[in-house]
Amino acid sequence: NGDVVIKDFKTLKNIYTICLPKIHNLMDEEVPMAIYSMDIKNSKLLILVGAEEGSRKLFVFDLKTRKLTKIFSTSKSLMQLKFLDKNRVLFASLSDELLIYNLKTKKFVFSKQVGQYVFSKFVLNKNLVAIGDESGVVHLYNLKTKTLKNISGSNKDKTISLDLKNNLILNASSDMQVGIYDISGVQILSMKVK
């Protein structure tokens, strides 16, 4: 519905609702914005939304002042975001590209094409970003060393679920395969699920 509801973690009671502005669709009807991704750090909530004509907008909501601010509007097909630190935001686009945006300078300061398929999701663990797409391959990018490694195994279709912890990557794909790999690329487990 284009709203973000802030809840108390313990009681699950609503604390506050952020009502995002409406947009106009192709029929010139007022509709809610699609919310693609959110992340929170230091009382700031980032909200990435779909806007008119396929564009994306980034909003920051200050949880202390309850003020919503539009940061940018772009034609880039951004799909997911994550804070890197208080000033930098990591984005992934539909075209399998990683981008870093600096909130202070209001500029994209980095971009890296990591794959050639349609992006599914990414997870961030310190300096490592694991990116899943429609190929089933996990692209492991090190933000510090700027190195890219492609990890493949039993997953041959779109990544549905992805995790990266303790130097292990879990990739569950739409071909009903679950693969667990270490960050060197060795497959540790392959399992078909029903």
Image: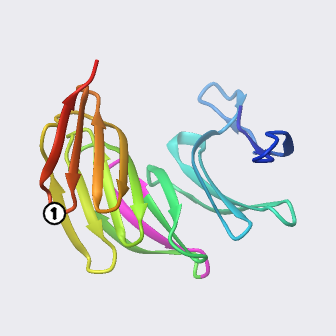
User: Amino acid under label 1?
Assistant: Ser
Coloring applied to the structure: rainbow
Left or right relative to 189: residue 72? right
Q: Toward which corner of the image does residue 178 lie, by quadrant?
A: top left
| Point 85% across, 66% down: residue | 64
Q: Is residue 114 visible?
A: no
Query: Of residues 78 and 129, which is closer to you in this image?
Result: 129
| Point 45% across, 60% down: residue | 91
Viewport quadrant of the C terminus: top left
Secondary element at tag 1: loop
Which percent across, then down, holds residue 164?
A: 35, 55
Q: Is residue 35 visible?
A: yes
Which percent across, then down, holds residue 165?
A: 37, 58
Left or right relative to 22: residue 172? left
Viewport quadrant of the N terminus: top right
Numbered range of the magenta stretch: 92-104
Neighbourhood count class around disc 1 (C-alpha, 10 Å): few under 14, some 14–19, many 20 upward: few
Which percent across, then down, holds residue 11?
A: 82, 41
Kindly report the secondary structure that dominates the magenta region of the rendered protein: strand
Q: Would you name the residue on which mark 1 appears?
A: 184
Which percent across, then down, holds residue 139?
A: 24, 56
Vertical side of 84 occupied by 32: above or below? above
